[in-house]
């Protein structure tokens, strides 16, 4: 849901597009889902390596076999409930107003527990990037309250055709896991494995991801202070239903 969210690719990163709750699963299935979301994409590569910890965001990365593009995982707090953070990620049409590099975001299809959305990015010094993603979304109840998960993968065949002068991103996998931290805030885990498209060298694309990850956290942390979200930012919903 930013990409989204997003695959900001010359500074590549992707935000999840939206949230629709799915039925609760058995406890063991929930634990497996949580573990998968925390560890990154399911087609995992090598062991995670801690890269940095600054401004409340810790970034890890790892290589995938046969690729010089690194997968990234970032963990940090957001001073709002998971439900509030999800409401921000669900407001995908507003991404151009607050998400870095996002010039366009259109929801093409909403189904029971998935969303298909198109996003276009304007990034410095290179041509625009675009992609269509399908996000799978879920919600369940943990010991401290509702937990939300978004997982996404490319769905370019379900979106607009390629445009002249815009580099199409074909590799963009990732997700969000938003967990209550017991204080009314959220422990957010973000993972992304993407290629920026075009002809950017891998080391530039990888460094772009590092920069964009922090910008995404900054954007969401700022957004939760917006008056339309701030009133609910530290209040859990009265009913924590997983349906």
Image (spheres, rainbow, N blue to C red):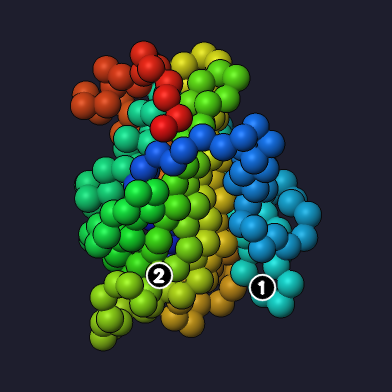
**Which dot marks residue 32?**
none
Task: Give x and y (percent) for residue 182.
Answer: 55, 16
In the rendered view of the protein, which quadrant contains the C terminus?
Answer: top left
- Outermost residue, bottom direction? 164
Counting every numbered tag in the picture gives 2
Q: Which residue is mark 1?
A: 68
**Which dot marks residue 155?**
2
Q: Is 174 displayed left or right of 93 in the figure?
A: right
Q: CA distance from mark 1 to mark 2?
A: 23 Å
- Say whether disc 1 or disc 2 marks the residue closer to the N-terminus: 1
Q: Is 198 displayed left or right of 33 in the figure?
A: left
| Mark 1, secondary structure of its residue | loop
Task: Give x and y (percent) for residue 58.
Answer: 62, 39
Residue at 35% over, 49% down? 112
Q: Classify mark 1: residues with Cα within 10 Å, few (<14), some (14-19) or many (20+).
A: some
- Outermost residue, right direction? 47
Task: Give x and y (percent) for residue 175.
Answer: 51, 50
Residue at 33% over, 72% down? 158
| Circle nearer the viewer, 1 or 2 | 2
Residue at 73% over, 62% down? 45
Task: Give x and y (percent) for residue 93.
Answer: 22, 50
């Amino acid at each position: 849901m930013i990409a989204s969210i997003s695959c900001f690719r010359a500074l590549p990163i992707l935000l999840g597009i939206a949230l629709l709750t799915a039925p609760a699963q058995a406890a063991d299935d929930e634990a497996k889902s949580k573990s998968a979301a925390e560890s990154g994409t399911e087609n995992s590569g090598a062991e995670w390596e801690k890269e940095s910890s600054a401004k409340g965001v810790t970034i890890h990365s790892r290589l995938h076999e046969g690729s010089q593009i690194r997968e990234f995982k970032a963990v940090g707090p957001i001073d709002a409930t998971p439900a509030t953070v999800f409401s921000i990620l669900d407001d995908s049409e507003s991404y151009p107003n607050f998400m870095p590099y996002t010039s366009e975001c259109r929801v093409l299809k909403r189904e029971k527990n998935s969303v298909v959305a198109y996003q276009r990015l304007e990034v410095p010094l290179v041509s625009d990037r675009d992609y269509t993603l399908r996000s799978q979304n879920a919600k369940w109840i943990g010991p401290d309250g509702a937990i939300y998960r978004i997982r996404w993968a490319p769905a370019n065949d379900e979106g607009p055709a390629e445009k002249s002068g815009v580099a199409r991103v074909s590799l963009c996998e990732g997700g969000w896991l938003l967990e209550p931290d017991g204080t009314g805030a959220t422990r957010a885990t973000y993972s992304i494995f993407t290629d920026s498209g075009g002809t950017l060298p891998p080391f530039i694309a990888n460094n772009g991801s590092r920069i964009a990850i922090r910008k995404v956290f900054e954007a969401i942390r700022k957004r939760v202070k917006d008056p339309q979200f701030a009133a609910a930012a530290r209040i859990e919903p009265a009913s924590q239903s997983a349906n």
